[in-house]
Image (spheres, coloured by chain):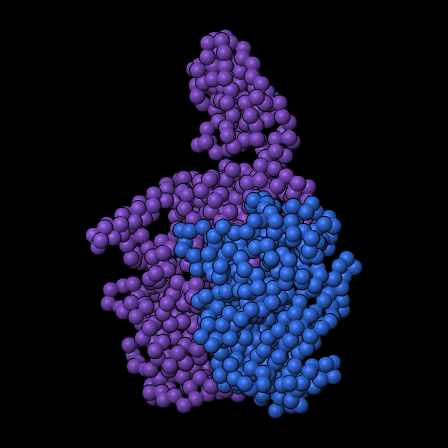
Amino acid sequence: MTESATGAGTGRDVVATDRETSTRGDRLVSVRDLRTYYDERTLLSRSPPVKAVDGVSFDLFEGETLGLVGESGCGKTTLGRTLVGLEDATDGTVEVEGRDVTDGGDAEWQRRVGMVFQDPDESLNDRQTVGQIVREPLEAHGWPRLSVAVEGVPEATVSGSGPVVGGRVAAGGDARADAPSATGDADDGPDVTVSLGRGTHEVSVRERLPLTADEVTVSVDRGERPTVSVQVDKSVAELRRDRAEELLARVGLSEEHVRRYPHQFSGGQRQRVGIARALALEPDFLVLDEPVSALDVSVQARIINLLEEIQADLGLTYLFIAHDLSVVRHIADRVAVMYLGNVVELGATEAVFADPSHPYTLSLLSAIPGSGSPWDGERVTLRGTPPSPRDPPSGCPFATRCPAKIRSDEFDLPEATWRALDELRVVFRTRARSEDSLVEAAKALVGLPVDAEAIDDAVGDLFGDRELPSAARAVVDEAVDLAKGGDDRAAADRLREAFGSRCDAEAPEAYATGDGERESRCLRCEDGYRGVAETVADRER
Amino acid sequence: MSDAEPLLAVEDLRTVFHTDREEIHAVDGVSFEIRAGETVGLVGESGSGKSVTARSILGLVDSPGAIEEGSIRYRGEELTDDSWERHRGDIAIVFQDPGSALNPVYTVGNQIREALKIHQDLRGAAARDRAVELLEDVGIPDAATRVGEYPHQLSGGMQQRAVIAMALACDPDLLVCDEPTTALDVTIQAQILDLLAELQREEDLAILFITHDMGVIEDATDRVNVIYAGEVVERAPTDALFENPQHPYTRALLRSIPGRTPPDETLPTIEGEVPTPTGPATVCRFAPRCPDAFGACVEVHPDQQDVSEGGDDRSAACLLHDDRYPNEMGTGDGTDGGGPDERSVAAAAENTNYGAVDHGGAPPETGVAGDVNGQGAAGGVDDVGDEGGGEI
């Protein structure tokens, strides 16, 4: 009994591993040190740029789903938009199969990538019918341009009319003469294949086209180099209409929906329309930006199932952007966790969720309410909010809120005091940011008194009855004086100098952790430091 | 559990909206109680009537809506138009979107002082000090500075804290929280949930927690009411509900949450949509979508049936638990099996008065909202038997 049970267990494990490795296809997209900044400098404001994406590198493999999670404002949407060419990268590269597509000018890449937006209310034009919405990308890209291959002879000339691309064809090749973009993926083969035999010819049409071999008329003018003329009996408009109907059927909508307007649909149905539109040009890669966040849970489940089904059928690669970790856990093979423009942890979803190696991932997981959460430890409630992406902290971006931050060796303080010091620094940083406003700047210029009482209040609130060693007390007093003098930034800097650690000084590189397939940008991954989970558990006690 | 008089007792509440085309029974016979110091959850999908319930309790239902029946008693006293005024400060509400709950042209301090003036008759320096105190209570650092800032200068989480501070300014006994964390990130949500729990401990506050998020309900509430199409279909202590849901809708809802299904399995779904109740309930409104429905479900309206186990007070409005209507499913606990004869259920449902919205514009079998106003009304009824075609 025991033996057979063990045997079965091992068998399952082997299968699981097989599945795991088989899902990893070839590398499709390589992102290297990508930065996207929003610079809004005007004559009147000198505010620094928003560093929405600030040095991100990762790979996407064919057929996988990479989940991208993080809180609002962390840059995940900007990253997705930069990948599809909707935003211009400030620096870094996006490569697809060795070609640089960073600047979004690559027509081939434009066809191969689709995007589904979060809010179908806003991403669908309410004055267009659903049919028009789905046809729009087809029209914009001049779909279809049918490529023709001729088999059975070494060389042929193809002449076509309507959607058919003409030109010279070498045996087995496509007619590509003056075709900047063909209809489908070149890897899927030509759209129309003509096999020339002795005195006969056979026509076949690629499966995913709304066209059958009967609807293609081919006449062959044989000679030394045969000329094949191909005529499609359907007009371009008919082909597009049929394609739109096919796409809507693919996402579970029916024929009679074609002439309706988006407002006549429920939220789930509208999102289906958005998915159909993204699939129009037979993409290989979809960026899904919070596709189910606006939906009720029962509707959400149906859209998730649909996305999984489409991916399996069409062999698509997904970048699935979401803030809901349960959804990402369900759908993603690998997950990238973003914080303040940086990917702080990346790895196989189950591994990352079971044993997060970055303190931010751990905090995010522990914040998921209810028993659906993968985390069974104590909840770690992060203090404060993420810093402004205009003014990210030096060193580790997460250092200001980190529950596992490495402490300075200079002081030996209880955890609560460390936290109070962290918080005081955040107070000064926040005040410093509001100094950028014109009124505050003017006040400082003319030397108006700063609200000293408010500062004393804040310090009293934080340190009330806490014992501080005299050295530490001296630094706090010094910082408070700086702040009362109107220089909050100097006050924050003083605290950082005295109480800061490596975390405040060094931006951590990506350390390989776990099985080597995972990476984490946390200094605690270095030898000699206690692990993140242990440290957090200890400090929260 | 205790015999003490509940702080708030809602009984058979019916709130109806009259429009040109139809009347919508948004809240249709909802009853629940809240005792001092406890958190009661109201959970359901959008359009289920949970927010209208909250607005009804606070007397915020405006024309074309009206409370047509039922009673809302605060400490035993019926809330009528007069007594509402008297208890204005006893019940406070926190809305979903802090951005729209705060007035952008006044500082946060101004808005809290306004509440303090009305409810506590505090003015001047006393009001200012109390406002700072309240902001500190809700965990806003550097409150003395923040009190002079405008809402746009605060982050979303800080704004929601400020809204809670405003609600606390009237020193309420009951806080109605309508999706208070839905617009917030998960780490900020955790902060707000911690804050609410802490305030409850300190001030002995009762909380009515309204949300669509089952995870939040599980963490934040003591008892929970599941609402579907204007009716409470199941009520139970929170732990018991999650451990062993008794109503088919609760079961289906819990199953469709991604975190509760292993990642490599397809998510179980509920076909169709929450119907818009356009008439009084005469049958079970969930029957057309219910995997366990049987003949009687489309003939009689289910009453709340006692499904208590071991003394925990709970009930479900489902005929599966009603001995008067035996069916081959037996006790009907949990199995997805067989299902009813869908055609007969659908045919019978056709004769009822809900889902009728659709017949105005759209062909009935599609489930597309035919409402010209673009409101998300959709007929779930007609979707039964339509194999995944025009659902959602």
Query: What's the residue at 45%, 18% (across, down)?
Result: A151
Q: Is residue B179 above or below residue A38?
A: below
Q: Position of residue B96 (x, y in %)?
A: 59, 69
Foreground residue among A11 and A148: A11
Which chain is assigned purple?
A
Q: Position of residue A52 (x, y in %)?
A: 49, 58
Q: Relative to residue B56, is residue B227 drawn left or right?
A: left
Above/below status of B57 relative to A184: below
Q: Give B304 or B120, whichever is nearer the viewer.
A: B304
User: Of A69 and A20, which appears nearest the observer?
Assistant: A20
Residue situated in front as seen by the camera: A105 or A83: A83
Q: Residue at x 48, y 68 (%)?
A: B241
Q: Position of residue A401 (x, y in %)?
A: 42, 71
Would residue B65 appear left or right of A487 to someone viewing this image?
right
**Residue B103 visible in the snapshot:** no
Write down the quadrant of residue A498 in the picture.
bottom left
Residue farthest to the right?
B20
Q: Residue at x 41, y 77 (%)?
A: A422
Q: In which quarter of the view is residue B234 placed?
A: bottom right
* Residue A72: x %, y % from top left: 51, 62
Give the colour of chain B.
Answer: blue
Q: Is residue B353 above or below residue B15?
A: above
Vertically, is B260 above or below A529? above
Residue at the limit of the structure toward the left, as seen here: A3
| Residue A380 appears anywhere in the view | yes
Name the residue: 67% across, 90% down: B121
**Picture mark count:** 0
